[in-house]
Image (tube, rainbow, N blue to C red):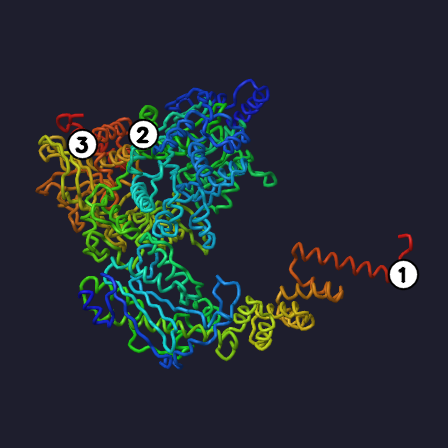
Amino acid sequence: MIPRVGLVMSEAMESMQLETGVRDPVRHLVQRLETRYRARITGRVVLPERPAQLRPLPAELDPRLGAALGSRGVRQLYSHQREAWDTVTAGRHTVVVTPTASGKTLCYNLPVLQAALKDRAKALYLFPTKALSQDQVAELMELNEAGGLGIRAFTFDGDTPGDARKAVRTKGDIVVSNPDMLHQGVLPHHTKWAQFFENLRYVVIDEMHSYRGVFGSHVANVIRRLRRVCHFYGSDPVFVLSSATIANPEALAEGLIGEPVAAITESGAPAGERHLLLWNPPVVNADLGIRASARSQATRIARMAVKSGLKTIVFAQSRLMVEVLTKYLKDVFDADPRKPARIAAYRGGYLPGQRRETEKALRAGNVDCVIATSALELGVDIGSLDVCVLNGYPGTIAATWQRLGRAGRRMRPSLGVLVATSQPLDQYIIRNPDFFLGSSPEHARIDPDQLLILLDHVRCAAFELPFRKGDRFGKENLEELLGYLEEHGVLHREQDTWHWTEDSYPAQSVSLRSVAEGNFVVVDTTGGRKNIIAEVDYSSAAETLYEGAIYMVQAQTWQVERLDWTGRKAFVTKTEVDYYTDAIDYTRLKILDRFEHQQDGRTETAHGEVHLVRRIPGYKKIRYYSHENIGYGNIDLPDQEMHTTAAWWEVAPEVLAQCFPNRQQALDGFLGAAYAMHHVAALIAMSEPQDIGRAVGDGDARWFATVGADGRGQMRSLDGGEQDPERETRFRPAVFLYDNYPGGVGLAAPLYDQRRRVVAGAVQLIGECGCRHGCPACIGPILASDEERGFSPKTAALTVLAQFEDDGPEAPA
Amino acid sequence: MAATELAQYLAGEVIDRHLIRVERQYPLTTRHGRGPLAEALGPLEPLVPPALDAFDPGLFPEGRVVGIDTETTGLAGGTGTTAFMIGIAEVGPGHVRLRQWLLTAFAGERAMLAELEAALSGADLMVSYNGRSFDWPLLRSRRRLQRGADLPEPPHLDLLHPTRRLFRDRWPDCRLATAEQRLLGLFRVDDLPGSEAPRAWRDYLAGGPVDDLQRVLDHNALDVLSLLLLGPVLARVLHEPAIHGANPLAAAETWLRQGQRPRAVALLEQARDQLDTRGALVLARELRRAGRWQEAAGVWESLAEAGCAEALEHLAKYHEHRRRDWERALDCTRQLAEAPEVRRRRVRLERRLDAGQRRLDLGPPASDA
């Protein structure tokens, strides 16, 4: 109770100070956090205030447009807006990289409106989500109405009613849509849009940074199709792209549209002083490396901010966490139901109307704190806030800055706090503040010529317009692909033209967002209830929610009764058992082709093509504490098989024999090293950990290794039987990091190129971890019994990594 | 098989390098189902294509009516679907003239669309089955892909829509084959199902057998001939929906759209017992418009008894404004679910009744009030 009283006291003092107006409340909060929680703050930055860089309105600006701007108080442009005007109106493709709330929309709205007013030219706006398109139309219409410009902007997406579609196609000056709709609803029917395409002058691609990885590779191909259709109608639109900060905006833009692009990266918008704190929750159990939860810390910081009268946003990684944090904060601030709510939650899964209302309340300043998922990360307009708390590292530097950008007003200081969870990625970032603060944001990569993706879009493109000999579509040999489709009866070649003959609509079967996005919900049905108690990532559902699994939340146990795979639901009932379950995951890889490699007789590092088979054949029931295996269950899920690309690290058997007293320890070392490398690799590749898979085993698929129920590595043969590593004739283990998408989307090659960073990062992650023998934050969970045996899995992992580090002469830079 | 050979096999002629035309003439006495083709000359009134404001009786049957149907590479729609065959039928002196065009290669498409353009120009009416949403957009789209000028579009009567309206709740489905069986008495024998047509043409392109192309041609011929006959039959159905087992309300609504109220009311009155709530409400509305208030009230009355709120509302209005029977109006209003408008009506009626009551209680108001 005593600290609580202390808190109240200091807050009372603070509010007095506020009233006197002596101190800025944000600076004051920073100071309080820094004095009171010095040990938890591992890094801090202050970005100084930045004044506005203003430029005059362009002389050639249509007077009606100038008047519309004037009526909204705009008499000058920020430098980046003017720069964009100059390049775009000169007909150059342009990408604008600017922070949140810097007026990026004017960068494209001005040239678009000018062209519409002067020449009745048309524009297509593409946003990654529907919600954003609605915001954009609203903003555009405000300017339009302010100046009485008479420009017609329409949204065209899945919600556009059938009878309104014709009007959109023929009457819209600006059509606002998303890549999925362009792909499935517009391009395959382009003849209906003939008038639109004939006059299409500009294509605006907002939130460009979200088009990376598989999704981005698809979108790049949709743009190829769009340009092909435009060409048919005799137009060649200029692309205007906008992006949050990433390392390679120019390269990503050029990859997406396939043309040189002018990049505008300096914002001329003013920004207030910005503070950033990196925050590690205190250790509560040093032996097992357990820290206080990020949740408790984030709640505390948000509470202090709101009590200081600061508008606050808290970002959480999952929907469930949003709800939990919302409850904690509501318990403090919204205890009186008669008063309007000060705390609001915002996440996917809410109805659009609900979301719009929350956005409005935020803009109007009626809500003091919003707790959100990445749903609010994109350009949804909620006005500016003072404090942003991240409950967990968002996974990439770029996403972190983008979320932090939610706090920051033009003339006042703002604060961002990144609170680490106990995940390895978080711990790595928080303990190496220089990595985060010093390095540029990640590269966003796409691979539009990935064969499976490319082939999908060659089919869609052939449906839209016949291909002719000599046509180009991507970098691969088009004629070869067309020949393949001809062989399969999809296309019919007549002289030099390939016609679509199949009775199908190919865009229907190609989803741009092929990585399944739906999380699974865990539904508690005990005693006829129907409560959602948890959410599970799609990628880990197979190994945690199989029928018979024991599912744990806060140490309470439920049993999975039924798994509805398509409905993304697992139905569980409360149960009291003395065991937990552990899925058996058999992943084996066979190296098919080495694209590049480096070896010195002791170790080999390479990347290339692999064949992978993953099977989850069943699960074990393991008793608490004793860890006896007390039974098995079967899991009925089909094998997942794929060809993909991977990077791998191998060590020669003789070297291992010198480093380890026995092969068992070597195996443990490889498994621990793989765990750490996997997380570091995700960081380097700007991907989610599940985009990359990891495996330890023989490169010829003779055997593979898993972590057994006793926490030790096990060597297994192809059918899953356990083997004695000492008897294996070819003990040449390797760590594989593979691209977890059929065919690969180009994650493996960069990992090979940056192989030293991957290994060095893993060494650092493990070496700097405060635990004694290993923990979930470095090499994965270990058992207390290891300590008794005097064996340190942590040391074993570092020994393996030391071999990887010593991988021969430095490659020429 | 070479185009000339195929043309010979199909009894047609090669009119362009990759295009075959097959032309046949059927005497008007030829039976098509129950009746002869001469029935194609029957009146189309009151069927009117949406593009025309009203039926012009002078135009048909003297006008030039063409039936049109295509066979395509698929049903998916979109720019990747091609029409490889077009069939057009029209009535000539003493016969029905049928023309069909068949592509022997994609390269013949431009010539085929030019033929179509010529065949359609000067037509007064184009009749199709589902052509407004399928065949016609597809042909327009193909023409765009050939960079040709837009095709001339005569007023377009798509018979699927009236058929659906009249028989949706009477037949298991409204496919053309169903309409042929039920309205024309035509039962096809050994017909190649339309869904097989894409495969037949693909097989031919790939150098396969041509037997099925003949069957596609025959199938398409029956389709277009049926179109010419279905129009007049549907017109007859609209005059006498009951004997054809059609929905009387749908027929009446067609007449209403033509502004022929008395005929619509007559149809509805005839079918009074078969009408559902919606039909009865339309009947009452039309009776009211015709000034037949009492009869309208009778219909509302029976609907209200069955619990129809809309009818109750009409009754309330009727009693309040027409008959000035505020007590009954209030009685009806009180049975309605509370809504702002209902509340206003109720308060207004209660005030009037109160005032009336006070007048009764207090005698005539003071003169200076």
Could you say which is closer to the camera, residue B145 or residue B216?
B145
Say what amino acid the circle numbered 1 marks: Gly
Q: Residue furthest right?
A: B367
Q: Quadrant of residue B63?
A: bottom left
Which chain letter matches label 2? A
Q: Nearer the viewer, mark 3 or mark 1?
A: 1
**On screen, A224 above or below A93?**
below
User: Which residue is label 2 attached to?
Assistant: A247
Query: Element at badge 3?
Result: helix
User: Which residue is label 3 attached to?
Assistant: A800
Q: Are marks 3 and 1 on the same chain?
A: no
In the drawing, what numbered circle is on residue B363?
1
Q: Quadrant of residue B314?
A: bottom right
Query: Element at badge 2?
Result: loop
Could you say which is closer to the camera, residue B22 or residue A171?
B22
Say what amino acid the circle numbered 3 marks: Val
Q: Say whether residue B319 is left or right of residue A286.
A: right
Residue A768 image offset from top left, x and y in percent? 28, 26
Q: Are marks 2 and 1 on the same chain?
A: no
